[in-house]
Amino acid sequence: MKVLMIIFLLIGLSTPVHATEISPPPVTGDAEQFMPEDMPSFAEGVLYILKTALRELRPDLTQSCRLCLSVIAVAILMSVVEAFSSKTRELVNTVGVLAIGFLLFGSTNALIGMAADTIQEISSYGKLLLPAMTAAVAAQGGTASSTILYTGTAFFDALLSTIITVFVIPMVYLFLAMTIGHCTIGENLLKRLRDFLKWTITWSMKTVLYIFTGYMSISSVITGGADKTALKAAKLTISGAVPVVGGIMSDATESILLGAAVVKHSVGIYGMMAIVAIVVLPFFRVGVVYLLLKFTAAICGVFTSGKIADVTQGFSEAMGFLLGMTGTVSLLFLISIVCLMKGVTI
């Protein structure tokens, strides 16, 4: 009779944490091609994703180089025209700034749209992944931890997505307009407004990430300790309340919770690789343009006056904002996944 009771109890305890019931959502869209077919370690998976993305980057690299060569050609042409007539210096600078702004705006606009779509895709995938992670942590006994961490991540994700969509992206366009305006007419007020926009964009993303990191750190310590205490109390209660077989049931409970931890870590590793797969190619594309424009601005500064170099540098800074946006949203979910994977130490 006791043997049958133990068997039924073990079956009942193991049901909620069965591995097939908690699985990460699959990656869809363009990011699917970057995911490894098997389930390697996180480092191996990320290395595979990076290598695959670099192979896909070659056409974008060629196109970006052509764009930067066009900018340099305009700068050299303006320099030659300026050398024949010093009286038309201001007109030449104005034409050069507008020409470079026209050349760069098309690619910049496409990259801004791509960054916005990537942020939306990361957020949408996070909304599917976090419930699976929360369920895995709750199955391990981290009910309080999973609830608090999930609520915090959902709140800060919504906050950050709103800030980027409603404020940051329009401010990037305004930043570019201020840059072109300042380099065209030389108005210092436009320069000060541009610098203020730059500070606001940087400050807003950093502040949200700092507050989120602090929230997750404090929540993990408080709720993790509470869940750990509750688990120990439950194991002691089982061990002492059931005569003869209480110790066996307590050990079985610990084994089941360890099995839930394995499921939680597998879901978390897949989720982190999925976030990297979603962001890697857009991040590389923007990063290549960012670096090439910085190099181009330095070359333009050699041939022409500072205004043409400044407008090119301004577009490079706009690419830096895009890198900051995609990186901030990705880091928010990666931090959340790590905190949920930490869960409860048995």
Image: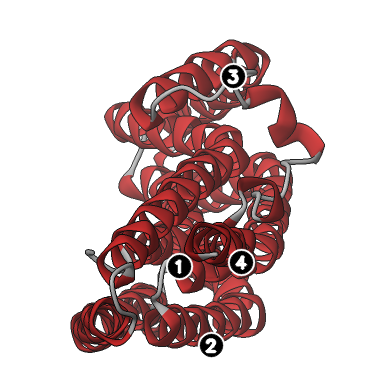
**What element does badge 1 sit on?**
helix
Q: Residue at x 62, y 27 (%)?
A: 35
Q: Residue at x 45, y 67 (%)?
A: 137
Question: Mark 2 or 3, which is nearer the eye?
Answer: 3
Q: Which residue is mark 3?
A: 38
Q: Which residue is mark 2?
A: 155
Q: Quadrant of residue 324?
A: bottom left
Q: Residue at x 58, y 60 (%)?
A: 4
Q: Which residue is mark 4?
A: 12
Residue neighbourhood size for the residue with mark 4, other residues' Cα within 10 Å, grouped as few (<14), some (14–19), many (≥20)? few
**What element does badge 4 sit on?**
helix
> Of the residues under marks 1 and 2, which one precedes in the sequence?
1
Q: Name the residue nearer the viewer: 41 or 34.
A: 41
Relative horizontal placement of residue 252, taking residue 75 as reference (left or right): left
Question: Mark 1 or 2, which is nearer the eye?
Answer: 1
Q: Which residue is mark 1?
A: 137
Amino acid type at mark 4: Gly
Q: Position of residue 76 (x, y in %)?
A: 47, 23
